[in-house]
């Protein structure tokens, strides 16, 4: 019913807060970026200022609901666009660094993170420790893109960061679902093996099937019409965002994993016409940036006050370990045979920002009742994300300039592929 929801003056105050934030960033965004003050840092700060820790202009209840929606939609778009952005056929020529980061560093960091969590968080079980490690394992493609396209960053380093951040969140989804099912099964009377098999067959099977079907349908329609009926101008943002959201929502409605569906649909579309694909992806990024900014505001309003009141020093230390030793150690070891100098290996190891994927994973676990907001998984994750936004934001530019890059094109390897195709 329409009258079941009452619009109050506080609703308009919350809208005004968001509107003013976008207005200020619209005017000062370029200056802030020059000062190494990223958009994520800005909108996270807005959220904290609007929370109960600050002015209290946005309610925590509303922010919590919106955070789930924004985080899921944004991650679906990111999963779809980043997997579609990859030219897997072209990348076969230069897969050394990305493969080492995904096949060696990623699982090693999950194992190391799980051990660190189990040792430092009293009373936590091995499933919960592994869950925390998986939630914090994927790096954020949106936050990593400024570094991956920075002209100071060597091409091989940029390619490794770009491919890793584009694929590792999709790779982590099945493991997250498996551990989540184990955690839920431990709380129920259902036998673990049948429950896990049924759950994964539904989540992975339906998600993969829906993603592939939607992706192939997208390619079929585009090729059949040769793109003649695609909208033009600012409406070009619609097709690819619609691909991501429709595959995600359809899989969720059928009982599958929407994240798997969004990722698979992007992988399928990655084999489509490259020129058309990159044009649609680029135009969709504007809407993704807006939803991402709303996610950071909601994160600041809902999550930060909870951690502000209850986080412990051991949690803070563990969050720093996740950003340093847990990430950097496996990455640097995995890249020993890559031929990269130690400074560049250290840069790749350091620059693993945590963001939207970790937030979406966290909200998914909350929604399924696997974790609670007063538990260590929630609090360590929030601390790690907040620290990552600040530390990676202020260090990206200076560290990129220190390691140097012979090329002055300012383009990432994948962007070079797009430019060559256009020509």
Image: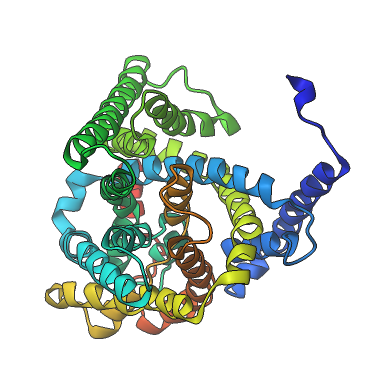
Near-viewer residue (276 or 290): 290
Q: In this view, does 103 lie above or below 232?
A: below
The quadrant of the picture occupied by the C terminus is: top left
The residue positioned 37% from the left and 23% from the top of the image is 254
**Residue 169 pos. (x, y %):** 34, 52
**Residue 126 pos. (x, y %):** 27, 63
Task: Locate residue 33: give its quadrant.
Answer: bottom right
Horizontally, residue 262 falls left or right of residue 2, namely left
Q: Can residue 146 be seen in this view?
A: no
The residue positioned 35% from the left and 42% from the top of the image is 422
Horizontally, residue 127 falls left or right of residue 153, namely left
Near-viewer residue (123 or 342): 123
Task: Locate residue 134: give its quadrant.
Answer: bottom left
Residue, far left: 337
Residue, far right: 9
Horizontally, residue 318 falls left or right of residue 91, namely right
Near-viewer residue (59 or 354): 59
**Residue 255 pos. (x, y %):** 36, 27
Residue, far top: 224
Q: Is residue 410 above or below residue 170?
A: below
The residue positioned 53% from the left and 61% from the top of the image is 374
The quadrant of the picture occupied by the N terminus is: top right
**Residue 416 pos. (x, y %):** 33, 54
Q: Is residue 410 visible?
A: yes
The residue positioned 42% from the left and 34% from the top of the image is 244
Horizontally, residue 292 falls left or right of residue 409, namely right
Task: Locate residue 300: give its quadrant.
Answer: bottom right
Near-viewer residue (284 or 293): 293
């Amino acid at each position: 019913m329409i009258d079941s929801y009452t619009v109050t003056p506080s609703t308009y105050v919350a809208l005004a807060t968001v509107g003013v934030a976008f207005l200020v960033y619209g005017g000062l965004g370029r200056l802030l970026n020059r000062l190494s003050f990223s958009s994520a840092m800005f909108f996270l700060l807005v959220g904290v200022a609007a929370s109960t820790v600050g002015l209290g202009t946005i309610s925590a209840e509303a922010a919590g609901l919106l955070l789930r929606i924004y985080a899921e939609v944004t991650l679906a778009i990111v999963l779809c666009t980043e997997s579609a952005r990859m030219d897997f056929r072209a990348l076969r020529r230069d897969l050394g660094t990305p493969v080492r980061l995904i096949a060696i560093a990623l699982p090693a960091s999950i194992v190391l993170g799980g051990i660190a969590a189990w040792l430092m968080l009293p009373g936590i079980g091995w499933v919960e420790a592994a869950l925390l490690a998986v939630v914090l394992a994927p790096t954020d493609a949106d936050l990593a893109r400024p570094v991956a396209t920075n002209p100071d960053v060597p091409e091989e380093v940029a390619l490794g960061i770009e491919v890793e951040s584009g694929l590792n969140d999709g790779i982590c989804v099945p493991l997250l679902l498996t551990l989540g099912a184990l955690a839920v099964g431990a709380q129920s009377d259902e036998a673990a093996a049948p429950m896990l098999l049924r759950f994964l067959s539904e989540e992975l099977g339906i998600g993969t099937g829906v993603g592939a079907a939607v992706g192939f349908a997208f390619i079929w329609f585009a090729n059949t019409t040769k793109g003649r009926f695609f909208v033009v101008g600012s409406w070009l943002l619609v097709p690819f965002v619609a691909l991501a959201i429709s595959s995600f929502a359809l899989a969720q409605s059928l009982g599958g994993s929407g994240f798997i569906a969004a990722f698979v649909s992007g992988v399928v579309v990655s084999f489509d016409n490259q020129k058309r694909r990159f044009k649609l992806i680029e135009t969709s990024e504007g809407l993704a940036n807006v939803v991402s900014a709303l996610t950071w505001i909601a994160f600041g309003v809902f999550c930060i006050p909870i951690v502000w009141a209850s986080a412990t020093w051991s949690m803070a230390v563990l969050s720093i370990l996740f950003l340093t030793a847990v990430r950097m150690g496996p990455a640097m070891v995995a890249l020993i045979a890559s031929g990269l100098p130690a400074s560049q290996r250290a840069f790749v190891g350091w620059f693993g920002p945590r963001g939207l994927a970790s937030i979406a994973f966290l909200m998914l676990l909350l929604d399924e009742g696997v974790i609670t907001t007063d538990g260590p998984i929630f609090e360590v994750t929030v601390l790690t994300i907040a620290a990552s936004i600040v530390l990676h934001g202020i260090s990206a530019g200076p560290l990129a300039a220190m390691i140097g890059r012979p090329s002055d094109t300012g383009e990432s390897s994948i962007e070079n592929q797009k430019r060559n195709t256009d020509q």
